[in-house]
Amino acid sequence: MKPQIDPHGSQPANGMVSKTTKGILNVLLAAILSATLFTALPATGIGLNSSPFQSRNGSGEGANAATPQISLHVGLVVGHWGHGDDVGAVCSESLGGFKEVDINYTIADLTRQYLEAEGVQVDMLKEFDSHLDGYISNALISIHADTCEYIPELGTGFKIAEAADNKRPEQAARLMACLKNRYGEATGLRYDHRITDDMTSYHAFGEVDPNTPAVIIETGYMNQDRELLTQNPALVARGITAGIMCFLNREVISQE
């Protein structure tokens, strides 16, 4: 039997059911596709990875990849170490018979330990180490002690110097300022401004890479500052460490 035609132009009943069913199916299909698409994409955006660092194991799991750490690298020259019979300044037996090289090594090795505890890679270098040729690091510090001669009034304190001809004067100046401030605070020693040509023309300054900030520090006088240098080298080393970390971390330097 032929279907009855609605005189008002309505569609046959079975035609309406067919169109309604198709509409529902289309809506469901669109919803399924949309859910599948947005489940597959990262929450940070279509096709984008929120982290600029890729997983090291190649799995693509950026969220689980460790954040790369900045590598900090410092060289410590032990004054007079490994240079034949040259042991630096020597105190008389009446003053303990201390040798500068032994004081320098003890302080440098403690400084190395403290820096490594801060996550800094440290090279212990001899006075005329072959590795100084073209040496590259964030900073180079040569550790020495001053004479054991008795100098009335002025025979106490510490000195710091950079190269007279420095390729990175702003960096070396900041390293000096950090060391001067932090070392002085830690040890209580006064800063001795009597810098010699031997310090500003120190041989290592001309050997290391021009981009490596380098300074030399005289940690104190082996006569009047002897007790600090020989009985409390840990305090001396902590003062040097604090100065180096001030430079590496770009810390604020308090006004004197």
Image (cartoon, helix red, strand yellow):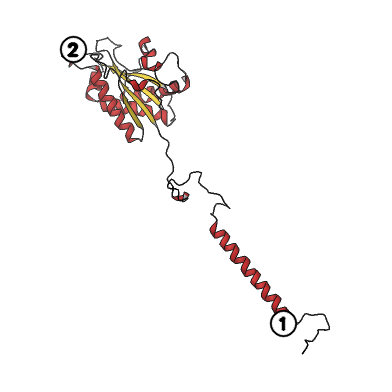
State which quarter of the image contains the N terminus: bottom right
Residue occupying the far left of the picture: 94
> Which secondary structure lies at badge 1?
helix
> Residue 14 bears which disc, if any?
1
Residue density around tag 2, few if under 14, some if 14–19, many if 20 or more, within 10 Å:
few
In x, y percent, where is residue 188? 31, 23
Residue 110 in view: yes
Q: Residue at 33% of width from left, 31% of height from top?
A: 115
Q: Residue at x 47, y 49 (%)?
A: 62
User: As drawn, which residue projects farthest toward the bottom?
Assistant: 1
Residue 18 spot, x, y in % from top left: 70, 78
What residue did someone put label 2 on?
A: 92
- Tag shown at residue 155: none
Residue at the extreme front: 1
Query: Is 4 above or below relative to 83?
Result: below
> Which residue does the image show at 61% across and 66% down from the upper left?
31
Judge from the rendering whether residue 115 lies leftward or rightward of residue 2; answer left or right: left
Residue 224 position in % (x across, y down): 25, 15
Q: Quadrant of residue 162?
A: top left
Q: Are marks 2 and 1 in contact (CB under 8 Å)?
A: no
- The three-letter amino acid code for the residue at tag 2 is Ser
- Residue 138 screen position, x and y as percent: 41, 27
